Amino acid sequence: MRTRTHLAGGLAMLAGLFLAATGVVTMASPQAAAATCTAGTANDFNGDGVGDRVIPDPGATVNGAKGAGLVRVVLGGGKGVAEISQATTGMPATPETGDGFGISYAGYDADGDGCSDLVVGAPYEDIVKDGANLVDAGAIYVVHGTPTGIGAGSTIEGYSQAAFDSATTTEAYDWFGFALNAGTAASGSPYLIIGVPGEGVTLSGKTYTDAGCIEYVQGSTKISLSQNSTGVPGDPEMNDRFGYSLTGTNRYFAVGTPGEGAGDLEFAGGVAVFSHTLSGGMPTPLVGLGQDSTGIGGASEAGDRFGSSVSMTGYRPSDQTYNSDVLLAVGVPGEDIGTTADAGGVAVIRIQPSGAYTQVAAFDNSVADVEGDAVADDFMGQRVAIVNTDSSVVTTAANVRLAVGEPGKDTATVKDAGAVHLFRPLDTAIGTADKVLTRGSGLPGTATARDYTGMALVTGSTYLYVGVPYSKASDSSKGVLYVLTWTDIDGTTSTGTTTYQPGSGGLPDAGAAFGAIA
């Protein structure tokens, strides 16, 4: 079993798949390094003004430990590839079987030096406490960027839950670090949110196993929040998994609770939305949402898992000069369509500073003109990624895009090949301009059975990132990541798709679940 002697100060259908590789680190040469970091570019770990790309492989074998996991950072401008694992020099840890280093990650400038810093979760890390081995307690690692790159030579901090927040207790199966979100709040303070979906929460003398919590940090504020915290929507219940999914912008963040019950309906799911504005020493709770909320389409049903995935982007109303509101996309992968089980669906909700909300779209593959059909076990909404491609102007249907994973989607000849479904969610008719990407049709490569394309999605204002970490194709059996521009997807440019995979572009030819982005 994994054993930690010291650490410094499924709900989803495929959760168990995040389970080989050692490689070299090719860092920027000293001649190419900047003298200091230059702030202003997101995910810029060497501070040279060019964005870098983070590509996890949480299933990788490291120093003989299967599933220990690693993360590769491709430095922009052709400055090399950094490989980071628990074997990296300066890391206060040792690679162990099944740690899952890289299942979650987030980038932000934690120390304000102008270089982005990388936070990596290893939620299945075992922690030794008082001689007892706490299985799957979880850990996170903060790897600081430098002008010469990131990884070996970086300052690295490792934390168990109690080491991170002394007001908490490290316990077995907490999954500390299962989800991460980070950025800079509108106040200018960096923030970090850590999901701990396995946390037990005690209420009135009873402990609810796997109720879940989050650890929230903004500036000097550090607090653990659960559904037992003042003002947080909902009540702690067994298997809620509060903190299973996270998303945020500079003004808001949301916490997915896919195990939330609705009456007697288990795993119906829910989402809690907060403002980063601090009040009483904590972020401000705004609203709790579920399919039983007024104005939210559909109805709560057992096993819907509303909130398994969440994604946010800024929204600027016509009467404002900034993105005062937010659009929240929520995946509902367990949604049944009539008698079609687990076909899945998505809701998109606009949220205002007051907490008032309006559903702007709710759909599934049974909606008129939407590409494809609702099929059992498609799990539409297993991953969602929404983006405002131009946040400097009033938000319209033309500048909001939504990518939805459908990892169980079959092609005409291949079972569970998976797909990514693209929408303009503010369109009056959701099927007007939707598109479906599969390997061999919109994406490079050849679809093979159980690829589960759509399990790994990230988007920014310019690019859509589609990972296929469980690729079964012979030419990408270690996993692959595709990077597309939104303008290419819209048909206004034809720059082409960039492909990252082990063995090319300076990446070591080793891996197990390369491209498991989330």
Image: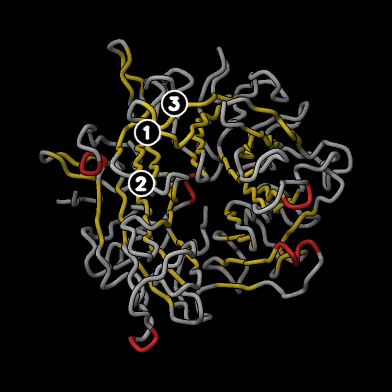
Few, some or many residues within 10 Å of mark 2 (<14, 14–19, 20+): many
Q: Which residue is mark 2?
A: 123
Q: Of helix, strand and loop, which one carries label 1?
A: loop
Q: Which residue is mark 1?
A: 198
Q: Quadrant of residue 210?
A: top left
Residue located farthest toward the left when viewing the structure as drawn: 130
* Cα separation between marks 3 and 2: 17 Å
Q: Of helix, strand and loop, which one carries label 2?
A: loop
Q: Earlier in the sequence, mark 1 or mark 2?
A: 2
Q: Which residue is mark 3?
A: 239
Side (left or right) of 469 relative to 193: right
Where's residue 95, x and y in %? 28, 60
Instruction: Give the residue drawn at x 52%, y 45%.
Output: 249
* Cα separation between marks 1 and 2: 10 Å
Where's residue 387, x and y in %? 64, 51
Where's residue 382, x and y in %? 61, 43
